[in-house]
Image (tube, rainbow, N blue to C red):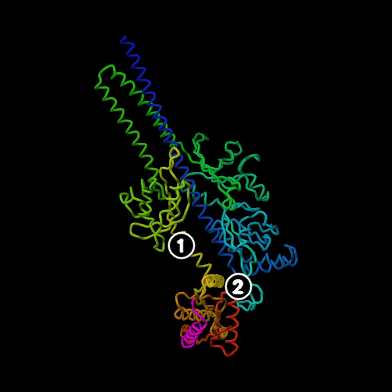
Amino acid sequence: MRYSLVVLIASATLAAMFAAGATLSLRRNEDNLADRLQEKAVRLQSIYEVSTAELEHEARALAYSMATDAEIGHILGEAGRDQRASKDSNSPRARELRMALGNRLSLLWQEMQAQFDLRQLQLLLTPDLTSFLRLHAPEDYGDSLMDVRPMLRSIQADRVPRGGFEIGRAFAGIRGGAAVLHPVTAGLTIHTRGMEAGREIEHVGTLEVGIGLDGLIARLSRTFNVSIAVLLDTERVTQAMWTRYQPGSLDASPSACCIVLSSTGTEAGEWLNRSLIDRGTEALQSRLMPWNGKTLQLIRFPFRDYLGTQDPSVPRAGTILIWRDASADLAAHQEARVLTIRNALLAYAVVQLIVLGALRITRREWQRQLDEQTATTERLARQNSLLLNTAGEGIYGVDADGRATFINPSALEMLKFSEQDILGRNQHELFHHHYEDGSPYPASSCPVFETLQDGRRRRAEDRFIRADGTEFPVSMTVTPIEENACRKGAVVVFRDITELTEKRQQLLRLATTDPLTGTSNRRHFLDVMETELARLKRRGGVASLLMTDLDHFKRINDLHGHAAGDEVLKHFVAIVRETLRKTDVVGRIGGEEFAILLPGEDKEGARELAERLRESLENSPSIVGEKSIPCTVSIGIAALRANDTSADAVLQRADEALYTAKRTGRNRAVVGA
């Protein structure tokens, strides 16, 4: 074979080899870029969904705290009775009550608009969910929301506070709702402060608040240097919302698939008008799009309203669109491409010369090429590491057996472990091994291991254990890692929600505690009694109730002032707490009237405790300043029975015994039937 032909064949073979190698490297570069963009999309979706869940918790807590206002309950009760009597939502009495309710809430409405970005505050009447007052649209009232608002129907049915996204007639956003309960005239003899005797609790209406998404997406946009738009499916808006309240998209075509509810940029409206974005799918989408001299990464994922979260077959409410400038990513990617091609051409030329020269030089040149490729790979790995290490959330990965494979600095800072302590260790056994009460936490119940088993993405609230043994609450998202249809492990993104948890607990205390005495308020005490009655029906046993009333308390207020009267009430509660067991529960029923639940105590034991309490108060006057204010108490005693249908029946018997104690001379304890 001629030398020139050998050289030609060798050159052609060498060229084919280098072309294949360059193609493989370029494909790897493309895959790396796609992986980085997908990881960014998953992280931004997780951040948005966690932030939305926190906003739902806040809306529900706000609605519940306002629904317990006795004056609001009183006005709604009056409005309901007028509505049933007159069948006219604009009667003179209805207008008077609507004005009174507006005056009651106007200042609070302004404060909550400023503090919580509140956009909606609505009160509705039972039983057909008639809108009585919209503070955000005061001219619109009298319409029934029974057929258009699933969340309100759920609250109407079971009185449980709820939160979620819904599109209403005058507002679309995150909503929270709670039942408004109020004492009304019935056949009972329960005294409530400032009211006549003979009241029972009824469901008079529902209070709903709405928080706009503008503040949330603005905060996320500033924090993560992205733009965000909330897109509602057009048919969902036109079916539910009054035309004059429907959001308008900037320059959006009437035939567009979506309507922009809220956005941190004008691009979304322009894209809709030009039909550059479609309805989207039910899965997370990420793609690149050139726009105004830049290349943007468009991230889109669906979200569901309240009904959609209960029934997955219900069509979604819309989609979240997030876009960011990906020019830097593409520039780095293009640089890697040019470098790969240049290196491939240079290597081919050098190797061609080496083949014509000597085998030793050829081996040396190949080694140089290998070193350059290794350096490129290491640089790309450093870029990926930088993205992971600069994230504000804690992020770690596990393999298919739950052993940690990587962890970022934010996670190490929150957990107080070193990287050496965590890598290769079973994360559940290391910082997730027991519940808050100290009982063992089985791995089968861990959200991370559940995702490793079924491959489903999960969001959950849980508790992690630091290296020093202390615990803290977290909101976590677990996403499976799959390659070629094979589950390789999972990625966990979490954040410390200690502040949010404390805020929830504070709202719960405000909703269940009497602010003056620190005892349970009436509503919470009745809930505790209902629970105790249910326990007696299931397991048997005994329990008793003391109904107390401070003798001649009005005289104390008249002689010494209401401030001194408040001190006497607190002094009485202090004596009660010293006398009671830890399992006993005291609640302020109204004014100077308190009820005490004694689980596990029969009537004789309750009588002995009542006598000790009475004697302690009689022998311990309240000291207010330099004044000594004596006070006595009358007590009625009743036993809880397994056949009692409600707490009201027990309260009535105890109240009758209390009335006997007062009628027969006061400062005594009387055992009722």
Q: Position of residue 83 (x, y in %)?
A: 72, 65
Residue sticking out furthest to the left: 360
* Numbered range of the magenta stretch: 600-621
Relative to residue 357, is residue 125 depicted above or below?
Answer: below
Residue sticking out furthest to the top: 2
Residue sticking out furthest to the front: 539
**Amino acid under label 1?**
Glu
Q: Are marks 2 and 1 in contact (CB under 8 Å)?
A: no
Element at label 1: helix
Q: Position of residue 217 (x, y in %)?
A: 52, 49
Q: Mark 2 to mark 1: distance in Å?
A: 36 Å
Characterize the local packing of mark 2: few (<14), some (14-19) or many (20 or more) Cα atoms within 10 angstroms.
few
- Looking at the image, residue 318 sits to the left or right of residue 456; the answer is right
Which badge, 2 or 1, comes first in the chain's sequence?
1
Q: Main secondary structure of the magenta part?
A: helix
Q: Position of residue 259 (x, y in %)?
A: 61, 44
Magenta-drawn stretch contains 542:
no
Label 2, on which residue? Answer: 645
- Looking at the image, residue 638 sits to the left or right of residue 468; the answer is right
Element at label 2: loop
Label 1, on which residue? Answer: 502
On-image quarter of the N terminus: top left
